[in-house]
Structure formats: structure tokens, C-alpha cells
């Protein structure tokens, strides 16, 4: 059974850091691009970062230079290191698997993890 399980969300002050993890089971992760999306209250879900199966990475302009996506296919895990956090980074963060390349429509979603940035 396929599962994407996020962890690592929580509370941070502006300027702080959090590291999100997404553990995949039931898929061969090296066949998929792994992506992070987020949804702020009252806003549409938006793409944050993506790592294609060939290792190419993509970032939304709003997080470039602050967030870093990484993956270990052997551990079936993808991470999102979030530094210099801002209140606008608040939202539910979702891990998603996309067949092969970014960008694309996700085939599978995790359940989400809450990130709150506030002073």
C-alpha cells in the first residue's frame, strides 16, 4: 500500500528553521519526482519545491535561497530544509510524488504537516 508520511512540522519564530521529512512506502521512489506543496489558510495550494528523478531541483521564487530539497532514494525519504522562515511560510505542507519529472500533477499525496511561523 502506497503511503507518503510527512513529519517535522511545528512552530518556529521568524528567522528560524525547520526540517520536514517525507517517508515513502509502496513506491519505487527513484521513479518519481518528489515535491513539496503548501496551503496557507484561505489560499490555494501552491508548489514550493520539487526534485526530479534525475536530481534536478526546482523552487518557487518565494523560497529560493531559503529552502533546500534533498532526497535519498535508498531510504525512500525526501526532506525540505527551511531556513530564514517568514510568517508567510505558515501553512500545511504536503509531500507529493509525481511520475518522473517536475513539474507535473501529483500522483500521490501525503496527509500534510502544519508549519506555523510567528513571533
Image (cartoon, grey):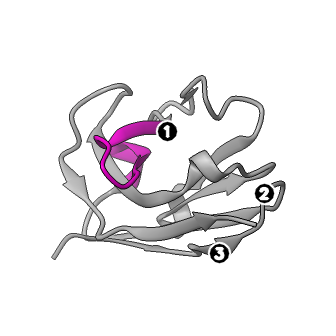
- Quick one: 84 or 69, which is closer to the camera? 84
Q: Residues under labels 1 and 3: Cα distance?
A: 18 Å
- Reply yes or no: does residue 92 show up in magenta: no
Residue 32: mark in rendering: none
Quadrant location of residue 27? bottom left
Query: Which class describes the residues within 10 Å of circle 3: few (<14), some (14-19), or many (20+)?
Result: some
| Badge 3 element | strand
Asked if the residue under mark 1 is in contact with the one under mark 2, i.e. CB atoms within 8 Å, the reply is: no
Locate residue 103, reporting x and y percent.
35, 25
Please name the residue shown 38% across and 27% down the image: 102
Query: Does residue 26 lie above or below 37 as drawn?
Result: below
Q: Earlier in the sequence, mark 1 or mark 3?
A: 3
**x and y percentages locating residue 91 in the rendered image:** 46, 58
Which secondary structure, mark 2?
A: loop
Report helix, strand or loop for mark 1: strand
Q: Look at discs 2 and 1 and give the one toward the viewer.
A: 2
Tell me, yes or no, whether the two marked residues, 1 and 3, touch with CB atoms within 8 Å.
no
Residue at (47% x, 70% y) in the render: 114
Residue 14 badge:
2
Residue 13 placement: quadrant = bottom right
In the figure, is residue 31 to the left or right of 17? left
The residue under label 1 is 48
Q: Where the C terminus falls, by quadrant?
A: bottom right
Measured as percent of width and height from the top left, residue 65 is found at 77, 31
Mark number displayed over residue 11: 3
> What residue do we see at 40% from left, 51% from top?
40
Range shown magenta? 29-49
The local crowd at label 1, few if under 14, some if 14 to 19, many if 20 or more residues have their Cα within 10 Å, is many
Say whether residue 87 is left or right of residue 83. left
Q: Is residue 30 magenta?
A: yes
Amino acid at each position: 500500500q502506497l503511503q507518503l508520511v510527512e513529519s517535522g512540522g511545528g512552530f518556529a519564530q521568524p528567522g528560524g528553521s525547520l526540517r520536514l521529512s517525507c517517508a515513502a512506502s509502496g513506491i519505487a521512489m527513484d521513479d518519481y519526482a518528489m515535491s513539496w506543496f503548501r496551503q496557507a489558510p484561505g489560499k490555494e495550494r501552491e508548489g514550493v519545491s520539487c526534485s526530479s528523478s534525475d536530481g534536478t531541483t526546482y523552487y518557487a521564487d518565494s523560497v529560493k535561497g531559503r529552502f533546500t530539497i534533498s532526497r535519498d532514494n535508498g531510504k525512500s525519504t525526501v526532506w525540505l530544509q527551511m531556513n530564514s522562515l517568514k510568517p508567510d511560510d505558515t501553512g500545511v505542507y504536503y509531500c507529493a510524488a509525481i511520475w518522473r519529472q517536475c513539474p507535473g500533477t501529483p500522483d500521490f499525496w501525503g496527509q500534510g504537516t502544519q508549519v506555523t511561523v510567528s513571533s
